[in-house]
Image: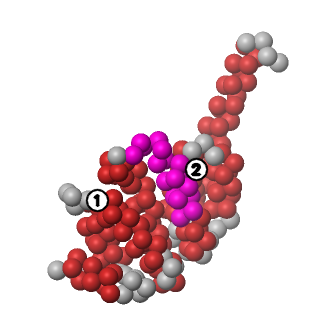
Amino acid sequence: DMIAKLRTLVDEYPNQLCFNVEAFSKYIDHLVKKSDTTKNDIDSAISIFEKSMILSSNAACVNMWNKYIDFLQDLEDIYPKLTGEDHDALKSARESKLKIVFEKALENVGFLCCSSFDIWTKFITFETTNNNLIQVNLLYFMALETPLHKRDEILKQYISTLENLYDEIKERLKEDEASGFS
């Protein structure tokens, strides 16, 4: 079966992990979505992603970066259950790892591929969730300077973000004024 063939390829040719994204995804899903997934399976999947992304053919593939980012984001729910570690204790390490992967994705495909819209929006959402508003502003600016499909959608999101932020600041100023701070 395909999973056995992919396992053989990964084991026998660990430095040549240039995969079809669909087949690669099935193998990774097999490792981490089976009923008896272990921490070693997760670590193995991360290792496979990292080794495969060193190859220029994989590093230049927007779909591969999206798969890797989605995989890391899905770990938020899976990993603490497997390790028994505290969710909050793992959060900082996970966020740091994910930020590095986002930065590598932008470096490899974000600025070069007009189809990297999803990577930009996922990174913006990640930074927004972490309340890194300076980084959010910078990412929107860089995305708008990049020739992307759906550029108008990013502009709409940016305007909406600015309007929401402006409304929040305006409300805080009103509250400060009402409480006697001027």
Q: Helix, strand, or loop for circle 1?
A: loop
Magenta segment: does it hold 13?
Answer: no
- Residue 54 image point, x, y percent: 51, 79
Residue type marked 2: Glu
**Spatial separation of the CA atoms under disc 2 and disc 1:** 29 Å
Q: Is residue 58 visible?
A: yes
Looking at this view, name the residue that lies furthest to the left: 1
Classify residue 24 as left or right of residue 68: left
Count all numbered tags in the image, as a single digit.
Answer: 2
Residue numbers of the magenta segment = 85-101
139 sits left or right of 34 in the view: right
Q: Residue at x 64, y 57 (%)?
A: 139
- Location of residue 152 (image quadrant): bottom right
Say which residue appears at 35% left-offset and 51% top-offset. 83
The one nearer the camera, 173 or 21, is 21
Q: Residues within 10 Å of mark 1 (few under 14, many from 20)?
A: some
Say which residue label 1 marks. Answer: 38
Q: Main secondary structure of the magenta part?
A: helix
Task: Answer whether residue 123 is visible to the viewer in this image.
Answer: no
Q: Quadrant of the C terminus?
A: top right
Q: Name which residue lies at 58% across and 50% down.
A: 127
Report the residue marked by disc 2: 127
- In the rendered image, the quadrant that contains the N terminus is bottom left
Picture coordinates of residue 121, whole percent (x, y): 53, 57
* Crowd rating for badge 2 (residues with CA inside 10 Å; few <14, some 14–19, many 20+): some
Seen in the picture, residue 47 relative to 4 is either above or below; the reply is above
